[in-house]
Structure formats: C-alpha cells, structure tokens
Amino acid sequence: MSGAQMTAQASAQTPAKVAMMFAGVALLFVLTGMFQSWNLALAIVNMALISSIMALGVNMQWGYAGLFSVGTMGFVALGGLAVVLVSAAPVPGAWALGGPGIVMGLILGALTIAAAIFVWARMPRGRMRGFATAAVLLGGFFAFRAVFDPAVAAVEANNPATAGNLGGLGLPVLLAWPAGGLLAAAAAWAIGKTALGLRSDYLAIATLGIAEIIIAVMKNEDWLARGVKNVISLPRPVPYEVDMQQSAAFVDWATRWGFDPATASSIIVKLLYAALFLIVLLALIWLSETALKSPWGRMMRAIRDNEVSAAAMGKDVKRRHLQIFVLGSAVIGIAGAMMTTLDSQLTPGTYQPLRFTFLIWVMVIVGGSGNNWGSVLGGFLIWWLWVMVEPMGLWLIQMVTAPMAEGWLKTHLLDSAAHMRLMTMGIILLLVLRFSPRGLIPEK
C-alpha cells in the first residue's frame, strides 16, 4: 500500500474513532443516570457543556496562537459579574444615595487615564514628560477618591444585610451572556495591550496576577456586587421548579406518566438549560471551525508555529495575538455568565484557579490542543471524572479498608478520599502526555 493510500485510510478512520470516543463519554453519562439518578447526570451534563465552552476559549488562545494565559478564572468571574450588572433588579435607594457619585467617580477615573496617555504621547521625551504624567495621575486620583469614596460609603450603608449595592439594569438574563463576553473582551484588550509583548512565561504570570486582582476587586467592592455577601436569586431563563409543581396541569401530566412531580420538574428544568447551553456550544463550534479553516485561521497557525517567519512575511504578530486573546477571553466570559445563570447566584469566593484555570487546561490538553472538537471531548470527559471520581474513590477505599481494624490508618485512608480527584487528574494528564502527546483528538 502506498503512502498516499495509507494516509487516505487513516483519514477515513478518524471520524469513526472520534465518534467512538464521544459515544464512550456519552455512555458514562447514561450509566450515571441509570445507576444513580438522571438529575445528577443532567447536572453534570450542564456543567460539562459550560466547561467545554471555557475549554474552547482557552483552545483559541493556546491552540490557535500559542498564547499561554492562565487568567481564565478572571474572565469567568467577569462573565458572572455581567449577569448581576445586566439582569439583577436595580436598588432605587442605593442609586438615590450614591449612584450619581459613583458614576461621576468612574468617569473621572477614565478621564484621568485618558489625560495621562495624552500627555505622555504629546510631550517630548525627557524628565518633564514623566513629571507631567505623574502630576496628571496624582491629581486625577485624588479627585477620583474625593468623589467616589463618599458615594460608595452611602451605597454600602443602604440596607447592607440584603442589598448594599447598586444592583443591575433588570434586563432579560439571556442578554447578560453576550454582555459577559463583551466585559471579558474589554478586560482582555486592556490586559493584552500591556502584557502580550511579554515572553510566554511572563505572560502566564501577568495573566494569573491580573485574574487574582479581578477576584479581589469583586470580593471587596460591595457596591458592585455585594462582595463576599454574594448576590442570590438572580433571574433565570427557564421556569422555576416550584412554579411547575404548583401547576395542576403539570402535576396531572407527571402523575399520568408515573413521575414524581418534584423529580420531573427538576429534570425538565435541567433539560431546558441543557438545550440553551447546547445551542451556544454548537454556534461557537461552527464559528470556530469556520474561522480555523479560513485564511485567517491558517495565518494564526503560521504565527503560532514560527513568529519570526510570519513577521518576515509582513504579518503583525502582536496585533493578531491581541485579536485572538480578546476572542478567546470573550468566549470564556460567555461561559462564566452561563454558569452564574445556572447557579442563579454570584459567589466570588468560589472562583479558584484549581477549578477555573488548571482544570480547563487539563480539558484542552487531554482533548487535543488546536482541535475544537477535542476541547469539547475533554470538557465532557474531565468534568465527569472531576465529579464522579471522589465518590467512586470513597467506595473503593471503603472496600479496601473494610477488613482493617479500626485505627488511625483506616481513618486516614477514608479521609483521603477527597484527594482522589486531584490524583486522578494528574494520572490522566501523565498518561495522555505519554501515550498521546497531542491529545485524544489531535489537530489535523
């Protein structure tokens, strides 16, 4: 058989292998529903869909352009913040007490930065340019604080037990999803303008630090989204289970088919969420695949593989890096908004690098860097393992320690079951890197 025939045969087998891998992962969810509960299986599916979208965003940055950013957590958090700012109900008392002052303070801050940039760009190089820029920044900072601080104090003193923030615009929650993408994209543009000129390792450090700053701001600025007090009862795009259970028609339908109304309502709500998330995921995959196969996608891969050669051919490498960094961050922001909508609450304390950076990177690496479908496969597989490994590990350790006498060793082993998921992620990552370094579905 000639080399061309072997290549054609391998290409023909690839879709079948990919379909088998997706079928195998789907079987894991079906078995979870059959042997545990369909509520649990659908809950894992919904978070797997969101995680796959996050992995798509990271894959755009790393798989398309080779940008090693570990600021994923910050963009997810900004997407969640957008849900509060767009869809939460406004707090009239807070707006009356300090809303205009906060808006004026933010405008002053933006004007100060713009004025400093203008002075720096217009003045000739030298010591005076530095002094003038510093004077503008210091003057603007004190003016900003003089207006902003009293307004923030007034807002946060307004019924802090249940409010203490400005609230949102009260718009439909589905509008918050693209708004989350826009907010994350704006932050990515600001980050990229300063950090994308750094070497890859410095870029990773910078993005991680900026993500931590974003989380710190969300935790401490109560006027924005109540800080660590959390924002609860956010609007939902699907019906509430309680409302469905109070509907006589729904109760009759569930009873007629032999379902418990409470269980049936929970499953239907999860299915509706899954349908919404699946529509977003498929739309993003279609757009990503179209872009990847276009001349723009070939240019991005050429820059990733050899920046020097691409620059020699007249390509603006830094501009293209900024472009893909913003696009990938926007996708991550959309996923962050979807996750907050699913939870119906914003809890800044739950945004941890382990969950929203490390785990997403594992999904991309295991699925296949540079392959959009690989990111989706990795998102579903790794999230299922992340949820299920701990109870499975506890069951395994209980079986192993059952014959052992009661004592510190048995207690220690049972208490260690919580660490099974971390050990499993490490083992899977090592196995994939050893036997399939390009991931389960490699880039073509």
Image (cartoon, rainbow, N blue to C red):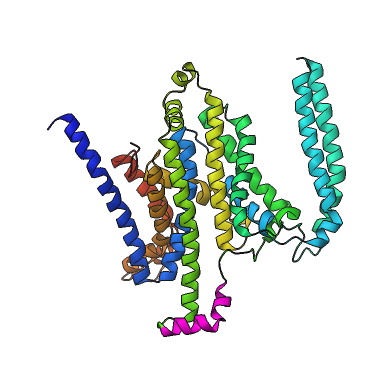
| Residue 407 drawn at (x, y percent) | 41, 68
Q: Could you tell me how many numbered marks the image carries?
A: 0
5, above or below 125, in the image: below
Q: Nearer the viewer, residue 426 or 24?
A: 24
- Residue 245 sits inside the magenta stretch: yes
Magenta-tinted stretch: 240-256
Kindly tell me whether residue 36 is visible in this rendering. yes
- Residue 160 sits inside the magenta stretch: no
| Majority secondary structure of magenta residues | helix
Tell me: 284 left or right of 74: left
Question: Which residue occupies 80% across, 47% down?
Answer: 103
277, above or below 190, in the image: below
Quadrant containing the C terminus is top left
Question: Which residue occupies 31% across, 71% down?
Answer: 403
Instruction: Residue 374: name its quadrant.
Output: top left
Kindly tell me whether residue 351 is visible in this rendering. no
Question: Which residue occupies 42% across, 41% down?
Answer: 289
Question: Which residue occupies 26% across, 48% down?
Answer: 17
204, above or below 126, in the image: below
Residue extending furthest left? 1
| Residue 302 drawn at (x, y percent) | 42, 26
Q: Nearer the viewer, residue 383 or 100?
A: 100
Tell me: 333 left or right of 217: left
| Residue 296 drawn at (x, y percent) | 46, 31
| Residue 106 drawn at (x, y percent) | 79, 43
84, above or below 216, in the image: below
Quadrant containing the N terminus is top left
